[in-house]
């Protein structure tokens, strides 16, 4: 009962558990970062709670009430005597600015923004820079309406407040996104398992010690040393390395400021350099990541092209043997038809077997020919098709193999599925490949309970979604980024490691998507747009 209450929405947009966690974390970050506030205002050199607020609003804009209420409450608690109303009003206006930043990020980069290319990095930095300027105008302008800052400090407040927000959004917001984004978490864990990352961290700590051990007037001259570990992390681990190395340098900077007698102006100047360091690291990391993605795409295209050449060669070489096989099967049927007497029953069985032989030979010829056409020009012969019989045919073809492996083969599809325009031969190749892999995985894990493979299909969100779930060991989260890579070696004896890559290429040629999910048991899904049938009609 308690668990259900925590999962239920406290108010529209946010579950109760998330709202409580946000408030606790916001108050903690607000308390930690409240150092060297500017006289007459609550402007601090570092504002990490801004990243927390923008991240929540990007995920759920309807949580504006939680962000505004928390900020106003925190401002009232720490406001100077007589400035409580001014600080609370300014905090509410600041939450409006954070909502604008979150909506812009959501519009251009998605609910969980992934900064993985130079273009997305530049969009991110542009939104953050302009958004922080808007926030400053709203916050300082609202304080000005109440005559909160002294007149001699009013103009100075703008650049200092801007730096505080920019540092938070450039350095801390990517960290929050990396923790919230499922594909990014395995990349972070994989990086933390490497010895080189800890060398990067050691280099950052050494550089920080060398810089902050100097007199204050010399620290700015040698601050560039802190760029080296960030550049190293970005060059070696891409955007994830840049994100975490910049966050580490930010933490070391805060520790240095907290443990020494810095004057406020010096703290703001150091954070201005920190903002430049974070932006540079992000841009370098995304450049490295984009280059790696381009290299992977090139290697994948070369592998797929090689597979296409192989399919063309197979189609040429197998054409005559398959034609001969069909001819011999037909001849066997004719000969069996002439038999009479006691062997008539066996003759009927022979006719049935040779008929199946001819059907399978025809199917093999169609598969090879259509795969050759697909690899050559991404050709698909779309027809209005009910996918139910297609799934039943694949289950029937794999039934004997499943029984021999002691795996229960089940079907859980919606019987009222709408038809879809698809290439039946190519989609059958995808289904056979996924089911074959699932049978292998389930058979390997028979010691962990009853082995089974389930194929489901249902319509959701304008898509026809087919799922293949097995009782095997499942897929580790760190394997997901490279699961469909053509360079990934096959685990099957004699396998080429191209099955999943080819299946994904076929599904994407149908304007669909093929993906896998981690967890207990293998979980593969592919979707086909239902709108395709309507457009062809």
Image (tube, helix red, strand yellow):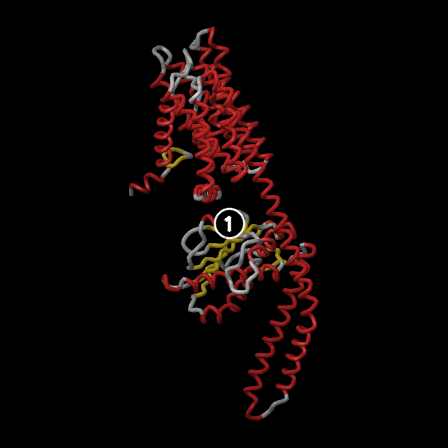
Say left or right for 7 vs 504. Answer: left
- Give the camera-side residue of 270 and 425: 270
The x and y percentages for residue 232 are 52, 35
Q: Say which quarter of the image contains residue 205.
A: top left
Name the residue tied to disc 1: 460
* Count of numbered badges drawn on the protein: 1
Residue 58 seen in this snapshot: no
The x and y percentages for residue 136 are 49, 18
Residue 321 seen in this snapshot: yes
**Residue shown at 51%/25% (left/top)?**
275
| Farthest bottom residue in view | 341
- Give the camera-side residue of 43 and 414: 43
**Residue shown at 44%/41% (left/top)?**
192
- Give the camera-side residue of 182 and 382: 182
Q: Say which quarter of the image contains residue 73.
A: top left
Circle 1 packing at 10 Å, graded few (<14), some (14-19), many (20+), is few
Residue 31 vertical placement versus 292 (above, below) = above
The x and y percentages for residue 466 are 51, 55
Residue 279 vertical placement versus 290 (above, below) = above
- Give the camera-side residue of 182 and 509: 182
| Farthest left residue in view | 1
Q: Say which quarter of the image contains residue 496.
A: bottom right
Provide the secondary structure element on which disc 1 rests.
strand
């Amino acid at each position: 009962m308690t668990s259900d209450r925590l999962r239920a929405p406290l108010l529209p947009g946010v579950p109760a558990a998330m709202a409580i966690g946000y408030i606790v974390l916001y108050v903690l970050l607000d308390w930690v970062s409240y150092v060297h506030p500017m006289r007459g205002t609550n402007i601090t050199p570092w504002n990490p709670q801004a990243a927390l607020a923008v991240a929540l609003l990007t995920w759920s804009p309807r949580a504006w009430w939680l962000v505004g209420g928390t900020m106003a409450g925190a401002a009232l608690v720490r406001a100077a005597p007589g400035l409580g109303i001014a600080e609370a009003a300014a905090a509410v206006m600041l939450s409006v600015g954070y909502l604008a930043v979150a909506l812009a990020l959501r519009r251009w980069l998605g609910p969980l923004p992934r900064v993985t290319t130079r273009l997305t990095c530049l969009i991110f930095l542009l939104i953050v820079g302009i958004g922080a300027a808007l926030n400053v105008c709203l916050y300082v302008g609202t304080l000005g309406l109440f005559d909160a800052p002294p007149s001699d400090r009013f103009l100075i407040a703008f650049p200092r407040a801007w730096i505080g927000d920019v540092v938070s959004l450039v350095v801390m917001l990517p960290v929050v996104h990396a923790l919230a984004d499922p594909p990014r978490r395995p990349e972070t864990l994989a990086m933390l398992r490497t010895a080189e990352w800890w060398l990067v961290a050691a280099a950052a700590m050494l550089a920080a010690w060398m810089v902050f051990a100097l007199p204050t007037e010399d620290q700015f001259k040698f601050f560039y040393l802190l760029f080296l570990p960030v550049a190293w992390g970005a060059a070696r681990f891409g955007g994830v390395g840049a994100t975490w190395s910049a966050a580490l340098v930010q933490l070391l900077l805060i520790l240095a400021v907290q443990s020494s007698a810095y004057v406020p102006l010096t703290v703001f100047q150091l954070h201005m350099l920190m903002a430049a360091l974070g932006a540079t690291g992000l841009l370098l990391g995304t450049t490295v990541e984009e280059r790696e993605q381009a290299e992977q795409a090139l290697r994948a295209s070369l592998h797929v092209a090689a597979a296409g050449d192989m399919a063309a060669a197979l189609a040429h070489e197998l054409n005559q043997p398959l034609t001969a096989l069909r001819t011999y099967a037909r001849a066997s049927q004719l000969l069996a038809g002439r038999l009479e007497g006691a062997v008539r029953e066996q003759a009927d069985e022979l006719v049935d077997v040779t008929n199946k032989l001819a059907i399978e030979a025809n199917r093999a010829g169609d598969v090879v020919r259509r795969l050759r056409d697909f690899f050559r020009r991404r050709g698909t012969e779309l027809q209005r098709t009910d996918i139910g019989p297609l799934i039943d045919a694949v289950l029937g073809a794999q039934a004997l193999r499943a029984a021999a492996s002691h795996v229960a083969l089940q079907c859980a599809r919606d019987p009222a599925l709408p038809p879809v325009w698809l290439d039946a031969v190519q989609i059958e190749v995808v289904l056979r490949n996924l089911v074959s892999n699932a049978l292998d995985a389930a058979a390997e894990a028979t010691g962990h309970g009853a082995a089974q493979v389930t194929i489901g299909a249902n319509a959701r969100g304008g898509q026809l979604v087919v799922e293949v779930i097995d009782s095997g060991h499942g897929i580790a989260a760190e394997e997901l980024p490279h699961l469909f890579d053509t360079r990934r070696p096959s685990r099957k004896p004699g396998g080429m490691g191209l099955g999943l890559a080819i299946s994904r290429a076929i599904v994407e040629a149908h304007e669909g998507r093929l993906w896998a999910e981690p967890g207990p048991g293998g979980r593969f899904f592919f979707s086909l747009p239902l709108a395709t049938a309507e457009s062809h009609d």
